[in-house]
Amino acid sequence: MTKTATPTDVDTSFQAAHPEVIDPAKSVSPAARVVIMIGTAAGLCLVVYQLFNLAWFGVLIEQRYLYALAGLFLAIAFLVFRINGRKGGAPSVLDWLLAGGAFVTAGYLVWTADTNLAEAWEYAAPPTAQWIAIAFFVHVLEATRRAGGWVLFFIVTLFAFYPTFASHVPDPFSGFQSPPIEALPYHIFSSEAAFGIPMNAFGSLVIGFIVFGAVLQRTGGGQFFNDLAMALVGHYRGGAAKVSIFASGFMGSMSGSVISNVLTTGAVSIPAMKRTGFSAHKAAATEACASTGGVLMPPIMGATAFVMASFLSRPYIEIAIAAAIPSLLFYFGLFVQIDAYAGRKRLAGIPLPDLPRILATLKSGWLYIGVFALLIALMVGWRLETTAPFYATLLLLVVNQVLHSHRLTLKGLGELIVGVGAALAELVAVLLGVGLIVGAFSATGLAGTLVNELIFIAGDNTFVLLLMGAATAFVFGMGMTVTACYIFLAVVLAPALEAGGLNQLAVHLFILYWGMVSFITPPVALGAFAAATLAGSNAMRTGLEAMRLGSVIYIVPFFFVLNPALIGEGSAVEVTVTLATALLGVGFISMALQGYVSFAGPLTGWDGLLMRALLLAGGLFFAVPTIEGLGLNHLELSAIGLALCAVPVLRAMRAGRTAAPSPA
């Protein structure tokens, strides 16, 4: 019987290099643990009070509510992250002082929120308020450095101070300039800077789903869904890798973190894949791709999707529904590649005696499915997006007490609260920092100028603009968190793409996808390199293999941004037909990349390379949107694709009847 791994199971050398995977619930000092528990509990009570409109002690204006949340979780961030950026350990005197400073300065902001709103302090704050805002600003920068790393810190700092020298920058990057005593407080007092859309999304949507995901993992939900995947697909060829796809995808959707997902699920899935015949680099690449895709998969998708919903002023459920088809295409492509690879290498599945029984698994954990059903029903049927995760979490805690095997103890509850507090503190530190970038564009008016310049450089060519956008998102994704990268590009790049006539929702998903590719693309490829450490494989070879396995992530964004039917924007018939041809196309592309046609046979030899090229081209014709410049509609493109794929499929069927397995 399998179990869900914990971060303590992973290679300690990688933990030393990547402190983000350490569990703060078990590594911080006892005093810090108590303070984190109290602060987190207070923050969650505040969230419930605000989102459920309890109003027992009066109504909180939004700015006061966000200041209070920021004060609590920014203080916790200094107790979780050490000065070198590592998680855990005993906080130093400096850490305690910074935590106290963040709490006190935020307390002043909470106390004066009404006056701030009435007197428009973002433009004319009194001297005392200005200096306290600057002090809070400094705390934000330091917390961003600790939680987000040096690269994000330098980017945030540059843009945060940009309004102080904007008029001295050459065109097209020049903007309105303000003195530091006015520009820096603007970041704190304005609703278009640190406490703008990112923090609004955090306070209204993100918190509930992070709490739900954390409670689900710590109460046995993660193990149940892993066991369910094992029971369903573990016995098929390449079963261990297929289990990894399902389990890592599900866990990644809950955690929103590629690295932590790789190191938790990968600690179990990678050895299982190696035992059933997968090479080390193939196993590591599979886990990296599955974990990366999880952040793009509904229903939770990590924090970025909630920020997107706030940016677009659309219900989160619409974002989740739109992301469902691209996510399906990505995982379908990965699944087909694994199946083709296993078919070509004649790899068996996991022996049935080693697998959990599906009926026993469902009997022991069917209540978890009920929790998800409640969550989806509340979001879709009742549109209770802000409160649905809290109802689902409450039901989950009740279920947890019914299921004896994973019953939460008082010690476990304490660790859960500390873990949730650490996750929320990390996110607040990053979101406040990224909000400073948004504030810089708001204060200087630079965003509108850059949009016009990007359109001019692209020469009104939409495809060139998309290529520029993909390259920009990839570069920024290498040095920033996914959420930070998305927020920055949503301000700078998205308006230019929308001005080019592209669908707004498709544009924002395009940015999200291309901000993610750096996790499996060398030279950075953090997800692939983390998995390589677990597998004991060469990091660069694993990264290149992850690029091949995850190749769909590079092309699908172009498909749905040029044909919004792939995000559900169209009639039912159009969406159905487009999805069907896209699935066929992605399937053929995946088989071509592995040199094996599922249910047929291998494509080997020199002529096999030609057949693979034809199959790849045919798959692209199936999946690609209408090509207006060539006067070809979707049906005609599919017909060309069918003609191109027919010969390789027939060739594979003939080879399948006679060919021996290719050498490993």
Image (cartoon, rainbow, N blue to C red):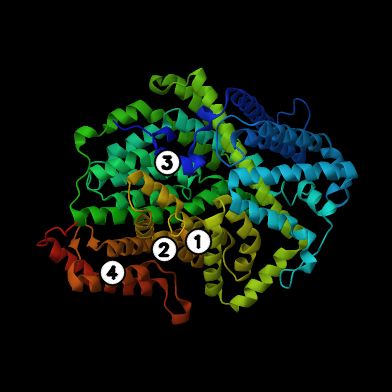
Image: 252 above or below 496? above
Quadrant location of the C terminus in the rendered image: bottom left
Say which label, 3 or 4, has the lower sequence index: 3
Q: Residue at x 56, y 62 (%)?
A: 507
Specify the amino acid type for callout 1: Gly
Pick whichever, 87 or 163, lies toward us: 87
Q: Are marks 3 and 2 in contact (CB under 8 Å)?
A: no
Q: Residue at x 71, y 66 (%)?
A: 448
Mark yes or no: residue 201 visible.
Answer: no
Say which label, 4 or 1, has the lower sequence index: 1
| Image quarter of residue 632 | bottom left
Specify the amino acid type for callout 4: Leu
> On the image, numbered disc 1 is attached to which residue?
570
Determine the CA span between mark 3 and mark 4: 43 Å
Seen as rendered, the residue at the extreme left is 658
Pick whichever, 390 or 257, lies toward us: 257
How many discs mark residues in the rendered view? 4
Determine the CA span between mark 3 and mark 2: 46 Å
